């Protein structure tokens, strides 16, 4: 049975608010007794974090839970936690222009044409990435016209084609997607040219 005259919770909230004022966070806090988190494991203060624009629902919310771990067989450990929605965070960052659009550059798209070429495609990709190149692999195994169209749409600067005849000589065909020129090249030369 709870004691209705117990002011421990009020004192705890007052201490928390005093601590936040002392720490310099008072401009970012608003006490709101109407906030109710929907989970019954909270044992103390609960909170929500909102966008300064206030156009979105809470970015994140959480609170104090002293008994959650013991409810699942662990020790009783006082804890504070929160959860957030990635879509809301992304929307707020875009709205506040804190999420700059970064140009996507793709140095190479590697296109194998048979399942047995996937291993060598992955090996070449790993070696190029270790040299600092950005690499994508197209494992769709579609006809060359379709895969070249996909490579062009991806914005890749170069496409590496794994044709069986060239692979038999430890070579690949590299195609410059802007100049529309292609040539066979030894795999070792390709890797060293990416340095």
Image: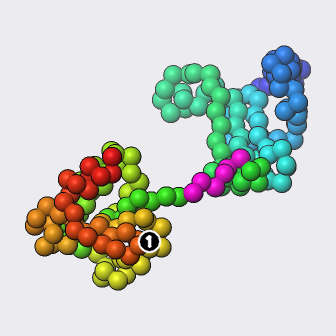
Q: How many labels does the image show?
A: 1
Indicate whether 183 appears above or below 128. below
Question: Is residue 38 visible in this depiction of the protein?
Answer: no
For residue 83, which quarter of the picture?
top right
Indicate whether 19 appears above or below 88. above
Image point 54% across, 29% down: which residue? 69
Q: Magenta segment: does it hold 68?
A: no
Image point 10% across, 65% down: which residue? 169
Question: Is residue 160 visible in this depiction of the protein?
Answer: yes
Residue 18: x and y in percent read: 86, 18
In this image, 149 relative to 114: left or right?
Answer: right
Q: Residue furthest left?
A: 168
Image point 69% across, 37% down: which residue? 62
- The dominant secondary structure in magenta is loop
Residue 166: x and y in percent read: 15, 69
Query: What range of the chain is rendered magenta?
Result: 98-103
**141 vs 161, nearest the viewer:** 161
Q: Name the residue under label 1.
A: 178
Image point 49% across, 26% down: which residue? 74
**2 vs 117, nearest the viewer:** 117
């Amino acid at each position: 049975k709870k004691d209705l005259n117990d002011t421990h919770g009020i004192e705890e909230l007052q201490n928390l608010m005093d601590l936040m004022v002392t720490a310099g966070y008072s401009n970012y806090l608003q006490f709101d007794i109407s906030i109710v988190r929907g989970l019954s494991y909270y044992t103390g203060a609960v909170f929500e974090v909102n966008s300064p624009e206030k156009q979105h629902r809470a970015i994140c919310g959480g609170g104090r839970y002293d008994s959650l771990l013991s409810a699942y067989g662990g020790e009783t450990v006082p804890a504070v936690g929160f959860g957030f929605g990635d879509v809301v965070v992304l929307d707020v960052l875009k709205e506040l222009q804190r999420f700059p659009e970064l140009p996507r550059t793709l140095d190479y798209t590697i296109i194998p044409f048979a399942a047995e070429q996937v291993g060598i495609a992955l090996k070449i990709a790993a070696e190029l990435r270790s040299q600092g190149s950005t690499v994508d692999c197209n494992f769709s195994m579609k006809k060359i016209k379709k895969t070249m169209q996909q490579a062009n749409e991806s914005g890749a600067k170069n496409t590496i084609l794994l044709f069986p005849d060239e692979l038999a000589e430890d070579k690949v065909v590299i195609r410059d997607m802007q100049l529309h020129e292609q040539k066979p090249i030894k795999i070792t030369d390709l890797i060293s040219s990416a340095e």
